[in-house]
Image (tube, rainbow, N blue to C red):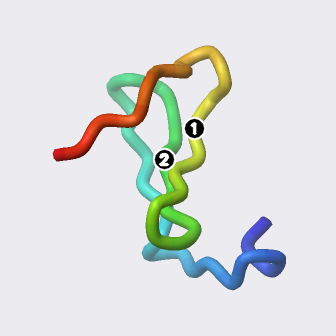
Amino acid sequence: MRSKYGSQDCDFYNFDETGFIIGIIRPGMVVTRSHYVSKPKNI
């Protein structure tokens, strides 16, 4: 996935307390485990 989208190590974040990884591949795209599906929220 890193080579396909050109992402770097700094684009990945590991939240050990919750047990999932969120990485911003490109603006507006967030990757997480599928059973955490919810509607997108603006913050």
Q: Which residue is mark 2?
A: 22
Q: Residues within 10 Å of mark 2 (few under 14, many from 20)?
A: some
Where is residue 43 drawn, in percent x and y?
Answer: 17, 46
Q: Nearer the viewer, residue 23 or 39?
A: 39
Asked whether, in this view, residue 40 is left or right of residue 3, the answer is left
Residue 2 is left or right of residue 18, and the answer is: right
Quadrant of residue 16 within the rendered picture: top left
Which mark identifies residue 23? none
Question: Which residue matches tag 1?
Answer: 32
Residue toward you, 19 or 39: 39
Between 36 and 15, which is closer to the camera in this rendering?
36
Q: Quadrant of the N terminus?
A: bottom right
Q: Residue 38's x, y, as percent?
A: 47, 21
Q: Is residue 4 above or below residue 12?
A: below
Q: Which picture quadrant has residue 15?
A: top left
Q: Earlier in the sequence, mark 1 or mark 2?
A: 2
Q: Are marks 1 and 2 in contact (CB under 8 Å)?
A: yes
Residue type, mark 2 in image: Ile
Give the secondary structure at mark 2: strand
Q: Amino acid at mark 1?
A: Thr
Q: Residues within 10 Å of mark 1 (few under 14, many from 20)?
A: few
User: Could you tell me which residue is drawn at 46 percent across and 61 percent down?
Assistant: 28
Local secondary structure at mark 1: loop
Location of residue 23 in the rendering, given as x and y in whole percent from the top left corner: 51, 56
Say if 26 sits above or below 39 in the image: below
